[in-house]
Image (tube, coloured by chain):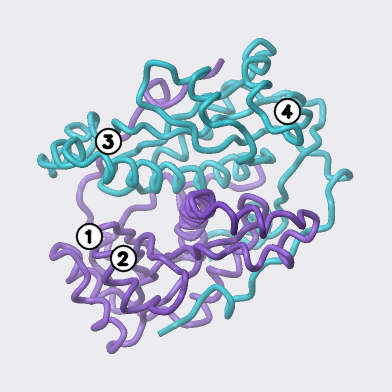
Chain colours: A purple, B cyan
Amino acid sequence: MPINDEALDVLFRNARTHRNWLDKPVSPALLMAIYDLVRWAPTSGNCCPARIVFVVSKQAKERLRPHLDEGNVTKTMTAPATAILGYDLDFARNLPRLSPHNPGALDAYRKDPVLAETTAFRNGSLQGGYFILAARALGLDCGPMSGFDNAGVDREFFAGTSVKSNFLCNLGHGDPSALRPRAARLSFDEACRIV
Amino acid sequence: MPINDEALDVLFRNARTHRNWLDKPVSPALLMAIYDLVRWAPTSGNCCPARIVFVVSKQAKERLRPHLDEGNVTKTMTAPATAILGYDLDFARNLPRLSPHNPGALDAYRKDPVLAETTAFRNGSLQGGYFILAARALGLDCGPMSGFDNAGVDREFFAGTSVKSNFLCNLGHGDPSALRPRAARLSFDEACRIV
């Protein structure tokens, strides 16, 4: 196989969502390395709508704090880094460069804001999936979360832009001794069929 | 590193979206193996909204054909398999089993269909990202597409259910000689910042 069994464990089978963090920093170079992988994975028409703010400093963490659901405060404030995964509703402005073989794409999205928003949300979330697996591939643990005030985070971190927050993802080295038992998943027959 | 450099190439850096397929079938066991990886990757509150139909038989491909954008017909009809990635708007019915420590979740989603739809679309797309990388990890090439009539595919493949189509993904072994030059991506500074 192109990717060995241990790697499949690290990416998928043994990886867990973490809430408790070891006292081990995450370097800016490692955060940049995540994006250096994510950028290559596919999006519709190469639209690349994901925008990421890595919240690392104490000051920036304090700007995030008031917008977190209560149950997400401690794990986020103690994480070495928290990524705000967002998506740019005006991703289309980059299409003349990202998708030069499709010259009509910019106008098509500008004329149809609902299509632009759906495309940004779908592909920004797809890139969120790539982000979590890229972080794991580089040896980090992830703690993704939807429990926060999106409008508040948008005001604080994306004011004056066309970027909307999607979800948050704590990053660091998780404490495996603090993990809960793993929750169930749907079987193949519950989630899939072959026709 | 937990995952070696060659694996990062296979997953991210050298992997390409394919449109031309080698004459090499994809077994049902391999399709099931993709889901066996995807199922473990995280979703919000373990909601697991993704639903997948693997379209393999000639008859099923013909049911898909009329709903494809013209530019997607040949590559889809010649692909060994085409996955319809969907999301279940009523994913919450499984939460008593998938998220037993959060007994209020089922009612919270049932009372707020907009929250349920947003959650299903966000997390179903996140699982779509996991799906593409899981398929690559197992040695397959992917050709994801948004260019089709979602309502038509829903009528044909999800009638009488609460599942909505999200995107399509051709699966097989791509012909590397038919690849176009790779399109540009955004730089770290264009897509990210560290605060």
Label 4 in the same subunit as label 2: no
Badge 3 crowding class, 10 Å Cα cut-off, few under 14, some 14 to 19, many 20 or more, is some
Q: CA distance from mark 1 to mark 4?
A: 45 Å
In this figure, which residue is indicated by the disc labeled 3?
A184
Subunit ID for the residue under disc 2:
A
Subunit ID for the residue under disc 3:
A
Badge 4 crowding class, 10 Å Cα cut-off, few under 14, some 14 to 19, many 20 or more, is many
Q: Position of residue B71 (x, y in %)?
A: 76, 36
Asked whether the viewer can see residue A113, the reply is yes
Mark number, residue B79 = 4
What amino acid is labelled 4 in the image? Ala
Name the residue at 61% across, 48% down. Answer: A3
Left or right: A104 as drawn, with respect to A157: right
Quadrant, the C terminus of chain B: bottom left
Left or right: A65 as drawn, with respect to A100: left
Q: Position of residue B55 (x, y in %)?
A: 60, 21
In this figure, which residue is indicated by the disc labeled 2?
A174
In this figure, which residue is indicated by the disc labeled 1?
A177
